[in-house]
Image (cartoon, grey):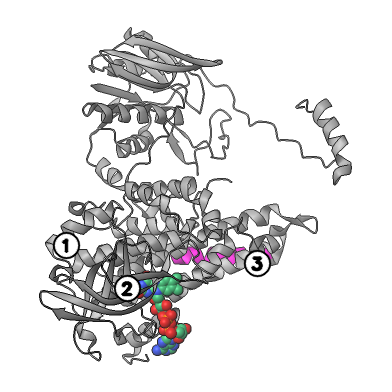
Amino acid sequence: MAKFTGIDYYEIDSLLSDEERMIRDTVRAWVDDNLLPIIQEAYIERRFPKELIPQMAELGIFGANLPEEYGCAGLNNVAYGLIMQELERGDSGIRSFASVQGALCMYPIYAFGSDEQKRRYLPAMAAGEVIGCFGLTEPDYGSNPGGMITTARKDGDGWVLNGAKMWITNGSMADIAIIWAKTGSLDDPSSIRGFIVPTDTPGFEARDQKGKLSLLASDTSELSLQDVRVGADAILPGSAGLKSPLMCLTQARYGIAWGAVGAAMACFDEALRYARERVMFDEPIGAKQIQQVRLADMLTGITQAQLLVLRLGRLKDEGRLRPQQVSLAKRANVDMACNVAREARRLLGANGILVEYAAMRHMANLESVYTYEGTHDVHSLILGQDLTGISAF
Amino acid sequence: MKIFVCVKRVPDTEARIKIGADGRSIDPAGIKFIISPYDEYALEAALRLKEAQGEGEVTVVSVGDAAAAEQLRSALAMGADAAVLLKGAPTTDGLATAKALAAELASSGADLILCGMRAVDDDQQQVGPMLAELLDLPCVTAVTEFQVEGGKVVCHREVEGGVEVVEAPLPAVVTTTKGAHEPRYPSLKGIMAAKKKPLTEKEAQLGASRIEILSLEPPPERPAGRIVGEGPAAVPELVRLLHEEARVL
Ligand SMILES: Cc1cc2nc3c(=O)[nH]c(=O)nc-3n(C[C@H](O)[C@H](O)[C@H](O)COP(=O)(O)OP(=O)(O)OC[C@H]3O[C@@H](n4cnc5c(N)ncnc54)[C@H](O)[C@@H]3O)c2cc1C
């Protein structure tokens, strides 16, 4: 297959620095050379391609926007976003892995952890030697994590955790879990704290979530915690209430807004090639107006989304980002990507349902992306509240 | 050990080349440029040598226009320590390029000079051997891998039906071809660090170019394919054509 050379209808490349472009091109080449050749098989086999972890670590992908003193690459947020874009051009499952490792596990240790925790975990996680998962969602508390019933109770010097977490990415393969639990009464979300729980602690169990039809090349698991005893050094001392996990989600959602652009690019690129090559009624289907409209719509969506995330990234780098702006981008870009993937799949006809083409894999994956990290609806409500000052949750 | 690697900016091998309005050069618009892949093998070998020895310095040198700084930055991002851009119009005359490199490298104290065996754009395969000649150094070409020990470089060359092992005293010029090691990706940290590494620009002391490109032409369009029939019934005809016309059977 011909190499992916990017989609850039508005000369957006010229808005990037040399380093940002070089970083994007490096991850792009890595995805072409190492991820795309194996992703179809991994997807069919329903396995996360673990063999890629050391390579991603060597490139410096994990926690790439965290500081160098912890073994991270110290990139700005635009470069970080471009990495997410390229990873998700490969597969949402791989981007999910990187998001969880970096934005949901390394970030809280960086933002809420003690110096000792940062030194102990961050370099090892950047090196891919310690894998993390993030346990917020529970069977009965999805969009409403503040209602969680997982508890952490003081016990001598340490803590005892009890509860269950569901839909946890990397859950079965993680070495540590960032578990969010209530340290006070169940109706007090301000008592939520984060804990670093080694997954080999007695009472901690992870079970693979069976029966998925989306994000097949990703580990999604259920966690159960029964009298899991951890030391006093397990609590993230800077975590304070529901806003702490929400701050992590803002980091991850930021990356997802970029990632969605990548998935859409992959589908558009595939659809455009197919439209040029597939002959029906004696001419390429790309010569038909209906398919041209499809392609024009896809390109429009991608171009808008690209400009949106680039501006979002610059705001983040200038320290002026509001979480609601991230909600707008996650909501708009993932929705765009879902549409592009579906239209690409349709343009491809019967071939579009095969794993040999990327469109349906992306289409199925993106349904998870639409739902996790705040469903599309939840982001509508966040924006609605921001606009009207009235909560409609 | 002081290792120098000569690298050239060339169009990406995957790029769709369009010929410029003058009919003698390619139109660079919209084309991605890269380090010539054979030069990347040389750079990878240099970086491995430095890592194995635990010390040393790898300097990349390019003769080219200002845009070639981009490839030198890539080389720095991959791990080279310093870069020198010899600014001058790229020429097809290998000797002119070799003279510019020789002027830079003559008093550099180089222990080992590596070049790609060939540049993938004009494929003249001249610069490495000419550079060695100008510097009065031994030259081993088309090397797949090499070791440095006791002031010597021991090179493996793939020759028809086997491997030839060649030894030369240092300093020497070695030209590389594809070996066991794929060039590494620059790490993201490496890309950031590259900004802080020295990239020196000088005027190239190019020799006079005595070779001139008169015209460039695209390869002829491939004729359309032919369908000889369908199903098993078509096989005999297909075999006949492959045998008699295409002569591949
Ligand atoms: C593949 C995958 C990986 C995941 N990984 C992780 C992970 O690593 N860690 C983690 O903690 N979680 C993870 N999740 C969980 C994810 O964040 C939740 O699924 C998500 O928050 C939605 O929760 P829910 O599934 O319980 O849906 P619900 O909250 O039950 O929502 C059901 C429907 O109701 C709508 N809805 C909910 N509330 C309202 C409202 N107030 N008004 C109007 N409509 C509403 C929703 O939009 C949705 O359409 C993952 C999920 C998936 C699918």
- Disc 1 from disc 2: Cα separation: 18 Å
Q: Nearer the viewer, residue A324 or B48?
A: B48
Earlier along the polypeptide chain: callout 1 or callout 2? 1
- Mark number for residue A117? 1
Q: Is residue A372 above or below residue A216?
A: below
Q: Secondary structure at mark 1?
A: helix
Q: Residue at x 41, y 13 (%)?
A: B140
- Circle 2 is placed at which residue position? A135
Earlier along the polypeptide chain: callout 3 or callout 2? 2
Marks 1, 2 in one chain: yes
Q: Secondary structure at mark 3?
A: helix
Q: Is residue A328 above or below residue A354?
A: below
View quadrant of ligand 1 = bottom left
Ligand 1 within 8 angstroms of badge 2 C-beta: yes
In the image, residue B141 lies at what x, y percent?
44, 15
Instruction: Report if residue A303 lies within the magenta region.
Output: yes
